[in-house]
Amino acid sequence: MEPRGLRRPPKNPEDPELALEGFYLLAAEAIRSFDGPLKTAALTAVVLPVDTDVNEEFGETDHLNVGGRLYALLFDTDLDLLVLTGGSRTTRFGLDFARNILTNVEVHGEWALITDFEQRPVDERGQPRERAADVMSYLVGMRYLTERETTFIVEYYRDGTGFTGAQMRDFFRFVEASDAAFRSTGNATGIRRAITLSEGAYGRPNPMRSYVYLRASQKEPFDILYFTPALTTIVNVVDQSFVVIPELTWSPLTNLELRLRGAALVGEQRTEYGEKQNDYRVELRVRYHF
């Protein structure tokens, strides 16, 4: 989860390492090293054009967006300050930090402010209720590495752009009513409206406001080289639904990766994971680098 990812496509928290299509942009960077508490400073400037042929998925077209990132290694703490503005999206600010408080314990956090964010939740009849406000998102987390090279990660994520529990329940009621109307009368208007909504904000990964992320992974157990089993869970704090993801990753040859993973989704009716289209899934991925 990445609240301060201001100019990148949003990651899927269930698979954060998955490669994503990026945007065309122009960037320039200046780096300088120092003696004293401030070890390194770097300034990055970014220009990101958006029109009907370039970066159209980023936001409103016919705008030239600019952003900046100031990085500092200060008192052995990694710090980033970020800003993005330009018209395709409303102006937004972000910061993050990461620090090793012990040799095997790292703490990290992120914060983002999005100005004039427009949200369009629907009521149980499918009618939108538009509102615009400045919203904040943040993340705090910790990473712990044991002597046996087991890594534990725990994070709490608060998404100010997400829907409340009541707003999601209204959406689910609208979907149920639309399905009932289609079955009884053949009227597909509500179903088409529900599909459109689910392809937007309601269908994004983790569309609500509060989540806990937990992950444990073990490097090369039983002396099996390049083999890593892991267990991940994401808990929706608002409605208490969750997903559990066990996975096995192995690289038997150079540039070849095999990954087997499953997912079990648990939740009551009208909860995020309880309303998913599947109760469980199994995936096998073979990836070759060249």
Image (cartoon, grey):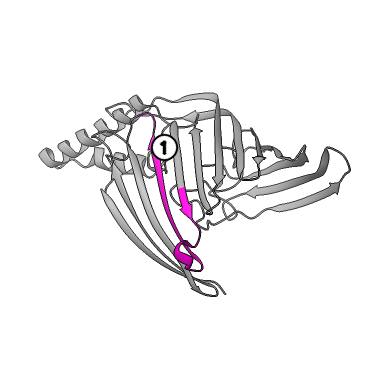
The answer to whether residue 63 is magenta is no
Viewed as shown, does residue 27 lie left or right of 215?
right
Q: Mark 1 Cα within 10 Å, few/some/many (few <14, many 20+)?
A: some
The one of 119 and 266 positioned closer to us in this rendering: 266
Picture coordinates of residue 150 (x, y %)? 50, 51
Extreme residue in the left direction: 184
The answer to whether residue 220 is magenta is yes
Q: Is residue 59 visible?
A: no
Where residue 89 sits, quadrant-wise, is top right
Picture coordinates of residue 135 (x, y %)? 54, 26
Q: Three-letter amino acid code at disc 1? A: Pro
Q: Is residue 286 above or below residue 182?
A: below
Q: Is residue 184 visible?
A: yes
Extreme residue in the right direction: 35
Picture coordinates of residue 67 (x, y %)? 70, 41
Residue depicted at x 67% and y 48%: 48
Of helix, strand and loop, which one carries label 1?
Answer: loop
The one of 106 and 245 positioned closer to us in this rendering: 106
Disc 1 target residue: 207
Where residue 112 sits, quadrant-wise, is top right
Quadrant of image for the C terminus:
bottom right
Q: How many discs mark residues in the rendered view?
A: 1
Residue depicted at x 27% and y 28%: 125
Residue depicted at x 75% and y 42%: 71
- Tell me where the magenta segment starts and ends, as one range: 216-238
The one of 286 and 270 positioned closer to us in this rendering: 286
Where residue 91 sits, quadrant-wise, is top right
Picture coordinates of residue 147 (x, y %)? 56, 51
